Image (cartoon, helix red, strand yellow):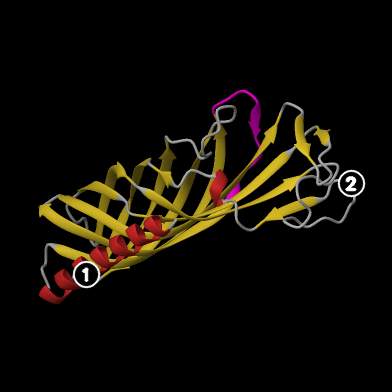
């Protein structure tokens, strides 16, 4: 965990320094901005023992930068903090061991997850020429994502696992909350990103930015689980401003 935190701190420092240097140089080819995104996210099962359980709501926020290496082409990068969620239902009966060492079986076990990642999207952005005050753009790339926090709510018919680690009310259909579920979740996502949108020029190098993005993960979210595999994805509505 210390190694992962060190990597994240170093990446944050490097990207922030790059943005600062280019901004101070006032290089017209490089622009820096702030962005915010609301997203709808879901978990897509890979193995047949689970089903998707609805969609979740999340958000992203952080820095973005475009380096225009040609008139209508730019290299785009970001440093954003992303919250996504989603749930799964287990089709099979699950067996847990209670505090007395007895094994208990449960049906219709549901997991609801909340994840927080730091993302560093890297993409190529394709732009049209400015039409009036509007420039249309599309982008394609990847968004390496590193897990910062994972939480899980587990619903069942009876208490299970160690009651010192979960909220136990001993009522039917209780929900048990885990504030630290990181050891069960793979520390990295590697999604493909596809997006499109517009920029509206205000004055000089300043413009408003909006667009849609699909973040399509192709790595499993579970850590070293041979029986259950799934991937989390989201669609986001991005808004921001370039300076």
How packed mark 2 is, by other alpha carbons closer than 10 Å (few <14, some 14-19, many 20 or more), is few
For the point 33% across and 61% down, which residue is it?
A: 209
- Check disc 2 and report the residue beneath it: 172
Q: Is residue 204 visible?
A: no
First in sequence, mark 1 or 2: give its number: 1
Nearest the viewer among 162 and 12 is 162
Magenta highlight on residue 81: no
Q: Is residue 107 toward the left or the right of residue 50 in the image?
A: right
- Check disc 1 and report the residue beneath it: 17
Place of residue 99 in the rendered image (x, y in percent of width and height, measured from the top left)? 81, 47
Q: Is residue 235 visible?
A: yes
Magenta highlight on residue 54: yes
Q: Give the numbered dot on residue 105.
A: none
SS for dot 1: helix
SS for dot 2: loop
The boundaries of the magenta stretch are 46-56
Query: Do tag 1 and tag 2 residues touch (Cβ < 8 Å)?
Result: no
Task: State the quadrant of the C terminus.
Answer: bottom left
């Amino acid at each position: 965990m210390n190694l992962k935190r060190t990597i994240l701190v170093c990446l944050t420092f490097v990207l922030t320094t790059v943005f600062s240097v280019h901004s101070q140089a006032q290089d017209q080819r490089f622009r820096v901005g702030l962005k915010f995104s609301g997203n709808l996210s879901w978990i897509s099962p890979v193995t047949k023992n689970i089903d998707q359980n609805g969609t979740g709501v999340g958000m992203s926020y952080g820095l973005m930068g475009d380096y225009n290496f040609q008139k209508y082409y730019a290299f785009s990068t970001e440093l954003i903090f992303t919250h996504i969620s989603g749930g799964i239902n287990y089709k099979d009966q699950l067996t847990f061991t209670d505090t007395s060492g007895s094994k208990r079986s449960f049906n219709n076990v549901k997991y609801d997850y909340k994840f927080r990642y730091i993302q560093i999207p890297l993409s190529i952005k394709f732009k049209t020429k400015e039409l009036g005050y509007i420039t249309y753009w599309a982008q394609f790339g990847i968004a390496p994502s590193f897990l910062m926090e994972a939480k899980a709510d587990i619903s069942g018919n009876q208490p299970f696992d160690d009651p010192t680690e979960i909220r136990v009310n001993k009522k039917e259909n209780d929900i048990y909350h885990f504030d630290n579920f990181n050891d069960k979740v793979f520390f990295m996502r590697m999604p493909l990103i596809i997006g499109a949108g517009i920029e509206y020029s205000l004055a000089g190098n300043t413009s408003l930015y909006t667009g849609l993005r699909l973040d399509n993960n192709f790595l499993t979210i579970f850590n070293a689980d041979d029986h259950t595999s799934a991937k989390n994805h989201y669609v986001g509505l991005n808004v921001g401003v370039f300076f």
